[in-house]
Image (spheres, helix red, strand yellow):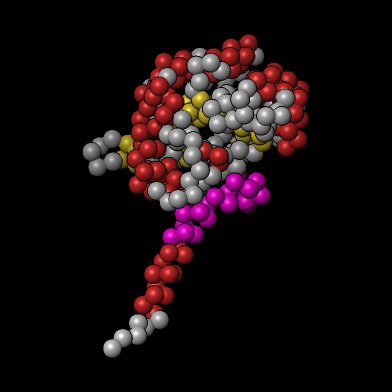
Amino acid sequence: MVTAVPANRTAVPAGLLAAAAAWHIGPAATWLPGVRAALGPGLDGRGDRSHVALTFDDGPDPVTTPRFLRALDALSVRATFFVLGGRLARHPALGRLIVAEGHELAVHGWRHDRPWCPRPLRDARELARAVDLVGEAAGRPPLWYRPPYGILTGGRWAAARAAGLRTVLWSAWGRDWTAGATPWSVYAEVTRTLRGGATVLLHDSDVVSAPGAWRAALGAVPELVAECRRRGLAVGRLDEHGLVPAPQRPNTDGTNIRFSRTLEA
């Protein structure tokens, strides 16, 4: 004899599954500029209206990153480099050089992958490893996190909060990762949405971009900085941009850890 299973026995697991999926992938909607702007200016990277934060993703790269450092030094500009933990582990001296030249290190995760499958434990573990390496290279704990591809999931949001990082995406970018990018196309794309208070996203490495795409970003930097200065805007690091880092609270062992109460309070 077969006993019927009440329908409500499957309804709860299905509901939990739907809720878990929404928790995981829902924050990814912040990839869309309109959603970011609606959720809050901090997540969009909007800061001091007299300032533009210049940021670079996907390094460090021993071939390309030094070229960006030389270009920025010639312009007397300091920037924020969102580095991948796995690459920093292979090139720790380059991370230290970035800091020694006056730039800021931030966290771009451990690897550059798309997080469609929920892996919250791996996210937390790998982000903590990246935070430790960045802190060692910088001589201080990092403040900022930008997920690979700008895709923020529930797991990565939680991992960033646990690590005491504030998530900052961008408000202007150059689409400099494409095979057809040129210095002019990068400049035109950035300035199309550039405003005072913007956070600009470029890439100092083509590790996940079209081969050689970094040349487009590098070639655009001098004219982009010049345009900002023509508009009376200073160009610099995120920690000079007027954004508030995640606050701190004492840990049980007496040390301080940072934490965030909301998505971007």
Is 139 positioned to the left or the right of 68 in the image? left
Q: Residue at x 52, y 38 (%)?
A: 148
Query: Where is 38 relative to 215, above or below?
Result: below
Query: Where is 2 relative to 137, above or below?
Result: below
- Decide if residue 5 is in sight here: yes
Q: Position of residue 78 (x, y in %)?
A: 57, 20
Query: Where is 35 relative to 222, above or below?
Result: below
Q: Position of residue 245 (x, y in %)?
A: 47, 37
Q: Position of residue 257 (x, y in %)?
A: 34, 38
Front residue of 254 and 80: 80
Residue at the farthest bottom position = 1
Is residue 246 rendered magenta in the image?
no
Is residue 21 rendered magenta in the image?
yes
Q: Residue at x 44, y 26 (%)?
A: 87
> Which stretch appears magenta?
20-42
Q: Residue at x 62, y 51 (%)?
A: 35
Is 243 positioned to the left or the right of 189 in the image? left
Q: Position of residue 256 (x, y in %)?
A: 32, 36
**The quadrant where residue 165 appears:** top left
Q: Principal SS element in the magenta part?
A: helix
**The quadrant where residue 86 appears:** top left
- Decide if residue 48 is in sight here: no
